[in-house]
Amino acid sequence: MEKRRYSPQLTGKVTALLLLMSFCFHLIVVQCQESSTKMIRHLSTDTPSPSRPPQFSTGLKRILLSIVLGVLTGLTGAILSACVVRFLVRYMNRTPILKGPVIFSPKIAPKTLQSALASENQLLGSSSNGKYYRTVLDNGFIVAVKRLEPFENGSPERQSKSVKRRIQQELEMLASLRHRNLMSLRAYVRESDRFSLVYDYVRTGSLEDAMNRVRENQLQLGWEVRLRIAVGVVKGLRYLHFECVPQILHYNLKPTNVMLDAEFEPRLADCGLAKLMPNLDRTTSGYSASECFQNCRYTDKSDIFSFGMILGVLLTGRDPTDPFFGEAASGGSLGHWLRHLQQAGEAREALDKSILGEEGEEDEMLMAVRIAVVCLSDLPADRPSSDELVLMLSQLHSF
């Protein structure tokens, strides 16, 4: 990751802040010196003597009063200085509301991007929080643009500048992520009521597209390729959970948000994006853990549950919303069906028949079923971490 370069404007602000702090400290010192001077004067002019006890009492009171006033003045100055410094730090750290494109790639020019967005673009697909478009820039560079759903008219999200600043901060943080299993954010554009995000264009499409072609017998994905996809997905999660500071949660992991390159290497898209969408209903996707809608609690183990569903899809070839699961004896969900078959010793019945091949691969798939069932545990504490999953899945095959 590149080192952050501080602009001259930021350096000037820091210098001004230091000068202000030194000035406030100087005021406090002057107040203390004045209090000390007053005390010395009282000691020199009101020296107590045995023959004048009333004047001695008066001088002592003056000394004590001067000390108290000096301390109070110093404390008041220190508190005011701290408040001023805190206000200035918050003001300096506040993210300005940017207009127009914010570019993170040298291949994209702001004017070129704006003109491309204004033209007609090819719709690639849609999700619960926006639509994907294929966009060709004037220089021939192809990008995928996701236009988020607009904020509701009159809602606080549309009017609040603080929300827009928070979204910009999150997007700039996401643009700094670099991992082979993550989609890189190349630019974003803030419009009056929505954001448009620019990513690299992936020709193969999403894992959802690939599995749909598999179900329609238009594509063959062997076990080795499917396992490579699963390992790549969990490596992306490990990067988000353990290598990013602060920790990043995906919030909306599902096959439509797993893009595949020409070698079927997965890249996670929309990392942390659902956190910015207040009206997004994740419970309807079929990939969210029960704690997400029971007590609105989302942790890294919630991402693991979503990964378990993806692993189950890769193993079985079935969509979690398939009516089959409601009709099955153990029905209700893909996770319950897999758990029932494993406990009954019939896990082989769950495997996609199109990938059943050599005996060694079948053993790997049966072990992967066990891993998927553990990831789909009802209690988050019973699910493994993404760090543990990388080791567990990598041991099934050499990568």
Image: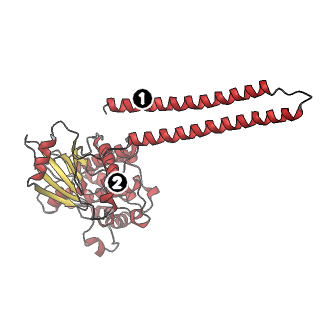
Can residue 312 be seen in the rendering of this structure? yes
Judging depth in this view, the residue of 381 and 272 nearest the camera is 272
Can residue 307 be seen in the rendering of this structure? no
Judging depth in this view, the residue of 282 and 108 nearest the camera is 108
Residue 8, position as x, y percentages in the image: 32, 29
Q: Nearer the viewer, mark 2 or mark 1?
A: 1
Using the image, determine if residue 322 lies above or below residue 186: below
Q: Circle 1 is placed at which residue position?
A: 15
Question: Within the image, what quadrant is residue 130 found in?
Answer: bottom left
Using the image, determine if residue 95 lies above or below residue 119: above
Specify which label sits upstream in the sequence, 2 or 1: 1
- Mark 2: which amino acid? Val
In the displayed structure, does residue 377 sit left or right of residue 81? left
Location of the N terminus by quadrant is: top left
Residue 282, position as x, y percentages in the image: 32, 63
Q: Circle 2 is placed at which residue position?
A: 163
